[in-house]
Image: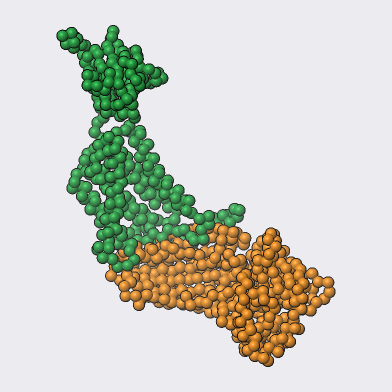
Chain colours: A green, B orange
Amino acid sequence: MEIKSLKVDFDETKAIIIEEISRNHKLLHRHRLSQPQIHIGRDYHNDIILADPHICPNHLSIQLLDEQWKITDNQSINGSFIENIKEKKHAADQHIINDGDVITLGKSQLRILFSDHSVEPTVAFSPFESFINLMRHPMALLLSVTLFTLIAGAVFYLNTPTEVNFSQLLVPTIGMVLGFALWPAGVALVSHLNKHDARVMAQLGISFAFFNLMWFSDLLEGISTFNSASGSIIPLLVMFSSIALTFSLFWLNSYIGFHMSARRRIIVAASITMLLFGGSYLIQYSNKPEFNPRPQYDATIMMPSFLLAPSTSVDEFIKESSTLFDKTKKEALKK
Amino acid sequence: MAQWSEQLLIGKQMKAFFTLVFIILSSSSYAEEQAEQLFNQLKPSLYQIKLIDIASGEKSSIGSGFQISDDGIIATNYHVISSYALHPKKYRIEYLDHQGNKGDVSLQSVDVINDLALVRRDTEQDMPYFQLSESTPKNGEQLFSLGNPHDLGMIVVPGTYNGLKKESFNDRIHFTGSINSGMSGGPVVNKQAKVVGVNVATSGNAIGFLVPHDKLINLYQAFLKSAPESIEKQMAEQLMASQNKLITTILNSPWQAKQLGENGIIPIIDVPFIRCWGDSNTDKTDALILTAVANCSLDENTYISSRFFTGTMEIEFRTMQAKDIGANKFYHLYQQQISRAGAGNRANKENVTEYQCHHDLVMPDNQAITNKSIFCTRAYKKFPDLFDVLYLSASIDQETQALVSHFTIAGVNQENALAFTRKFMEAVSWK
C-alpha cells in the first residue's frame, strides 16, 4: 500500500531516463521510470535487468532523496563507477547523479538523463532523401544496373581487337557488374554490423546511378582531351568533376548507411576519396622508373563525330613544339 | 625487318672461334705465303689496344691499333676507346706490342662519325709505321685485314675490296673477308702494305665493313694542324656537323609522293641511304582492320657508348581500313595502335633527358587531312643543342580509315628538326 501511495505521489517532472548504451556510446535500450527508487541488477526482482555476467544479482539502486538522485552500490563484486565530462572516473557509491552521467557496472554502461534533458533540433528531410527514394525504387535500380551492364559490355566490345560473340562479352560484363556491386553491398554490410539499417536497395540504387554518371564523365573527359591541345585546362576541369562525383557517391553512401554529424560525414567521404585518388596516384608514382626512355604523350583519338574543336595550322604546331627544345635543354643543364 | 645487324668488332667476351679463322687462312696457299710475308713486315707497328678499368685493374674492352707516324701516333676505332673518351677518370688505355711490351697511351683526337681515334705512345727513337695509301683500291682487289680477334693473338685475314657500301650515308668499304670481334681498329692493307681502310664492323658470313683510309688521313692532318682542345667538344662539333649534312641532304633531295593503301599519300625520300620496307596483313582473313605499313630508315647509326647511340632516323607510315566494324570500335583499336611509340635510338639517363611532348589537332594548309599530331623531344646532356625528336600523327577525319605518319631522328638540332617536321607534315595527306 505504501508503495502504491508513493507512486501516486510521484512528481512526474522527476521521471528519470536510463539508457543502456554500448561501449562506444550507441543506444541499446531506453527506460523511462517514474518511481523514487530504482533497483538495477542481474536478477528478476530488479526494475532494470541486465544480462551482463559481471553484474551482481542486486548490483545497485538509485533513490530520489531531497530532490536529488543518489546511487547506492550494494557491495557489488566488480563495483560501479561514474563517468562524466566534469570529473574523473570514480566509484559511484553515494554519488549524486547529474544529467548525462554514465555509470559503468560490470562491462555494461548506463546513461542517466533527467526528463528535462534538452534534445537536438529536428532534422528536416534533405532533398537527397527523395533522390535516394527514387533510386532505390526497384524499377530505377533495374534501369541503372541495365544501363551499367550495357555500357560495360560496349566498352569490352570496343576494346577487343579480335572478333567477339555475345557470350564472350557476357562473362566479363557480368563479372564487372558483380564487382562493382561489391562496393554498395560492402557498405550495407558494414552499416548493418554497426547496428544501422542496411538499406541494401538504396545503396545499390545510388551507387549504380553514380557509376553511370562516372562513365559519362569518362566520356566527357575523353572528348575534352581529344579536342584540346596539350596544356589545356579543360581536361583537368573534367577530371575534377569526376573527383567531385566520387566524393558525392561516398557522401551519399555514408548518408544512407550511417548516422553521423554533417561535418564528420564530409570528412569521411573526403578521406575515402583522397585515399582512392591519392592512392592510385601514389601507386603510379612508385611504379615510375627513375628514367623513362619512352615519351609520355596523350594518344586519345575518337571518331570524327566527336571532333568539335577547330584544327590549328602547321605553323602554329611548329611554333608550339619549338618551346619544348628550351624546356628540355634547361632540364639537361640540371645535373 | 630484313635488315641485318652489324656487330661492332669489340671483344668483350673471349670465345674461341679458331675454326673460322683457320679455314680462311688455309683457303689459298699463295695468299697465305703473301700474307705471312706482309705480316712479318708489318708486325712491329701493330698493337692490341686495351681499356683498363682503373679500380679493378682488369681490361674492360680490347681492340686493335696501328702506328701511323714515327713519333708514336696509333690509329684505332673510336668505339674501342669510347669508355675512356666519356669517362677519362675511370679508365686508362694500354697498348701491347708484338713482343709483349706494354705501356700507356694518351687519347689525342677522335672522329666519332667515322669511328676513328688517334692515341699516342711514348717513343724513344723513330719507329717503323704504316704508310697510308694515296689511292683507293679497285673492285676485286685483294686486301689483308690485320688484327687481334677475341684476344687470340695478331692474325692476318685476306679478303676482297667490293667498293663502298651504297646505302651508307657515311662511306664504308664493303670488304669480303672474315673480320671478328677484337679486330676493331686494325688496319686493312693492299699488296703494297699500304693502309686502305680500318676494320670497323661485320654483319657475319664474311661480310665486313671498313672505314676508308681518306677519313683517317683527314683526321690525322687536322690533328697535325691543331690538336682538339677537348675530346667532348670535338665530338659535339662532329655530331652537329654530321646532322647538318644529313638533314640538309634530305631536305634538298626529291620527296616523291607515293600512294599507301587505298587513299593515303606519303612522301618517300629519294636518297640511297634511306631504305624502305613494306608489310601488310591482307593474308589474315580474320583481321578486323586491314593494315599496310611502309617503313623507311637510315641504315646506320653513330656509336657514342654501348648505352648511347645517335644519328638514327626512322620513318613509318601505316594505313588502316576497317573491315566489318563501326567507326567507334575502329577508333578504339586505332588508338591502341598509336599509344606506344618509342625512341629510335638507345639512350640512358646519363646521356639524355626524358621526353617532353606537345600535341594538337592540325590541318595543313592544303586542307587535305586533319591529324592529331604529337611532337616530343629530349635534349642531350653532354652535347649541347642536340636533341632526339619523335613525331607521331594520326588522321582523325575519316570514319573507318586512318593514316598514321611517324618519324624519329636522333641527334639533331632544333632548326633542322623543325624544318624536317614541317616538310614531313605537309607531305602526308589523303588522295
Q: Residue furthest right?
A: B125
Q: Nearer the viewer, residue A44 or A223?
A: A44
**Image spot of residue B134 (x, y percent):** 71, 83
Instruction: Name which residue lies at 21% across and 11% down.
Output: A11
Q: Residue furthest bottom?
A: B30
**Image spot of residue A328 (x, y percent):** 55, 57
Q: Does residue A208 sit above or below B287 in this rendering?
A: above
Q: Is residue B25 visible?
A: yes
Q: Quadrant of residue B290?
A: bottom left
Q: Nearer the viewer, residue A335 or A54?
A: A54
Q: Does residue A258 sit above or below A30 in this rendering?
A: below
Q: Nearer the viewer, residue A223 or A179?
A: A179
**Image spot of residue A31 (x, y percent):** 23, 22
Quadrant placement of the C terminus of chain B? bottom left
**Image spot of residue B413 (x, y percent):** 57, 64
Instruction: Name which residue lies at 30% across and 42% down.
Output: A187
Q: Quadrant of residue A251?
A: top left
**Left or right of A160 in this view: B9:** right
Q: Is residue B186 visible?
A: no
Q: Does residue A296 sit above or below B419 in this rendering?
A: above
**Left or right of B9 in this view: A39:** left
